[in-house]
Amino acid sequence: MNAQQLKARLLDLATTFKNEEAHLTALDRAIGDGDHGVNMLRGFEALKDKLDDQSVESILKSTGMTLMSNIGGASGPLYGFSFVKMAQVAKDEIDHETLVALLTAFTEAIAARGKVSGGEKTMYDVIHRAKDAVENGETVTLKTLQGYAEDTKDLVATKGRAAYFKEDSKGHVDPGAQSSVYILNALIGED
């Protein structure tokens, strides 16, 4: 994937988040404060005016800065920081090796910024599994990613606002896990 393909995929996320806003809001109402859908849409709608498309690196960095300043709650800093970290390992083309480096940076950024590890019902549960699968040469489709998000239903939240719900958080897909499905699908691009 080159810079222009990446740009198109990231800009397309505004449409994805517009279509998924109600779904993300419903997920966040169940175990959060109900603003994840509108926040993600706001962040990706702002991208069209802020994206620096000179290179893969500049696209990732400007995406990160835009998300940090336009998405409220924990997701803005988490996703924003992750895109900035991915920019630091970017190359001109995203081939398999570069994709693994990007996803590793994404995983490490979420772990560090969110102080999370696997099994805590967060976006990390989808992101680190996607990274491992790509690294192992597996095909990661939108359906694969959605399966990872669905697996968060069985977990008890221990981080973020969802942690206040304790056992009652079980049975719900984590909203951040769900939004990460769309972002990862844009980056991995198997579908």
Image (cartoon, rainbow, N blue to C red):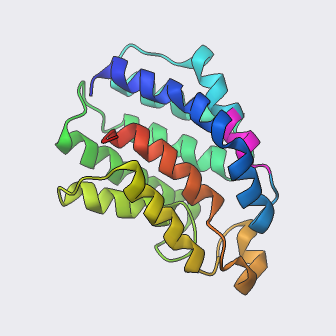
Q: Position of residue 166 (x, y in %)?
A: 73, 83
Q: Main secondary structure of the magenta part?
A: helix
- For the C terminus, the quadrant is top left
* Residue occupying the far bottom of the picture: 167
Residue, x 47% and y 67% (percent of image)? 125
Residue, x 35% and y 22% (percent of image)? 5
Q: Is residue 39 above or below residue 55?
A: below
Q: Is residue 146 above or below residue 156?
A: above
Q: Position of residue 134 (x, y in %)?
A: 25, 54
Answer whether residue 68 is visible to the viewer in this image: no
Answer whether residue 181 is visible to the viewer in this image: yes
Q: Is residue 110 above or below residue 8?
A: below
Q: Is residue 60 magenta?
A: no
Q: Is residue 177 rendered to the left or right of residue 42?
A: left
Q: Position of residue 103 (x, y in %)?
A: 34, 49
Instruction: Please state which of residues 57 and 33 is positioned toward the viewer in this rendering.
Output: 33
Q: Is residue 36 magenta?
A: yes
Which region is colored magenta? 35-41
Q: Position of residue 105 (x, y in %)?
A: 37, 50
- For the N terminus, the quadrant is top left
Residue, x 34% and y 50% (percent of image)? 141
Tell me which corner region of the image, top left, top right, bottom left or bottom right, holds residue 91.
top left
